[in-house]
Image (cartoon, rainbow, N blue to C red):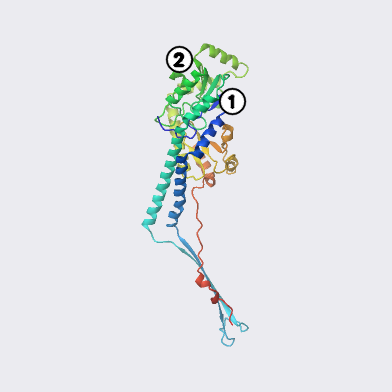
Amino acid sequence: MKTPRSSLALLIAALVLHGTASAESLYEIYQRAQESDPALRAAAAARDAVVEVKPQSRSGVLPNIGLGGDISRDSYDRRDAPPIVSKNSTYATNQVYSLSLVQPLFRWDRWVALGQADELVMQAEASYTAAEQELAVRVAERYFAALEAALTPRTRLLLLCHPHNPVGRVWREEELLRVIDLARRHDLIVCSDEIHCDLVLDADLRHHPLARLDPAFAQRTITLLAPSKTWNVPGLGCSFALIPDPELRRRFRHEMAGLVPSVNLLGFTAAEAAYRDDGAWRRGLIDYLRGNREVLQEWFAHSRRLKLTVPEATYLAWIDARAIDATNPLPAFEAQGVGLSDGRDFGFPGYLRLNFGCRRAILNEALRRLAPERLTFRIEPMLLRLEPDRLAPDRWAPPK
């Protein structure tokens, strides 16, 4: 099994629980683990230390600016004063200022040091990411324990977001089997929302329909699907549910009556065309979304304030923006002209969701606008050097 990429990798999307637990309580478990885990804290400290050293390496290849000045007063006998000095003066003041910009000659060792600093930053970031992934694995048991503890005798339905929205997690087969085991032991129906199943981006991963993993348990499943996400036809209003058990299907239809509209002809025709397609268009879409994802990875890799959960599926990027505002960073992004989804709507203040299912030019423009929020590195101020020996008091003391 691949190591989870996301700090939220083992989080069930929601529970229909009649007032007991919520996804936010599971998130709090991970937050506490982040704050107390020594390995993660050590990796964070090492990363921050390396990042602080990088500006020093950069300074070795930057030009030096020097500012100098000279102020002096010379006394004259009026009779011997030069023509430029007024005959009424007893002294004259000379003022000289200079500004110099010095670019050091090419220093190979300085450039090597700068390259080494970049490499150290990348290694430190990779070590921190690995520590986050390891922490996610170590607390996975606690996630499932919290999920099971949230169940009550009145709980009848578990909602599973598969693949996950907003973190883009592709659930592994063994994880889904564990969900099935939990549901079976507690006599639950599982409603699996698989609307993003056609948008798996990682080439070495595949979507596992929950109902296919256990034929016996399939009778207790509802699978929700639609062409709206993959083929971008949400306005046509066509979605459907796969319900193997006849009695459960009857109950589902009964509850739909008066709430869910029937599928219109145009939506049905579009869905039929999408699913009968030879797949070439969808493969092109996946390749394009992978390219957009790479653009995001490159941009966020150089950010000191924003962290990206790299999605394994979907066209949605989950952004940790708590370094900008721990509760509501959205206004800072809107001020730059970029509208994102508020993490508070998902139960996670300080996070944002970005939709990269768009033309690359639009994505690049959005990232250009967000450059002030990225804060790639600290720009150390260049010192203007004043030469004190040229401004010594005895040089401009009035004559006796």
Q: Amino acid at mark 2?
A: Ala
Viewport quadrant of the N terminus: top left
Quarter occupied by residue 93: bottom right
Q: Picture coordinates of residue 244 (x, y %)?
A: 49, 14
- Residue 20 bears which disc, if any? 1
Q: Is residue 235 above or below residue 306?
A: above
Q: Are discs 1 and 2 less than 8 Å apart at CB? A: no
Quarter of the rendering containing residue 156: top right
Outermost residue to the bottom:
79
Nearer to us: label 1 or label 2: 1
Who's the residue at 55% across and 20% down the image?
Answer: 157
Of label 1 and label 2, which has the lower sequence position? Answer: 1
Q: Position of residue 392 (x, y in %)?
A: 53, 73
Packing grade of label 2 (10 A; few <14, some 14-19, many >=20) is few
Residue 374 or residue 339, whichever sits in front: 374
Q: Secondary structure at mark 2?
A: loop
Instruction: Look at the image and tell me whether residue 342 can be seen.
Output: no
Residue 349 showing in the rendered view: yes
Q: Position of residue 36 (x, y in %)?
A: 50, 39
Q: Which mark is residue 308?
A: none
Name the amino acid type tagged 1. Answer: Thr
Instruction: Name the residue carrying label 2.
Output: 216
The number of numbered badges drawn on the structure is 2
In-front residue for pair 5/312: 5
CA distance separating discs 1 and 2: 29 Å
Q: Nearer the viewer, residue 392 or 43?
A: 43
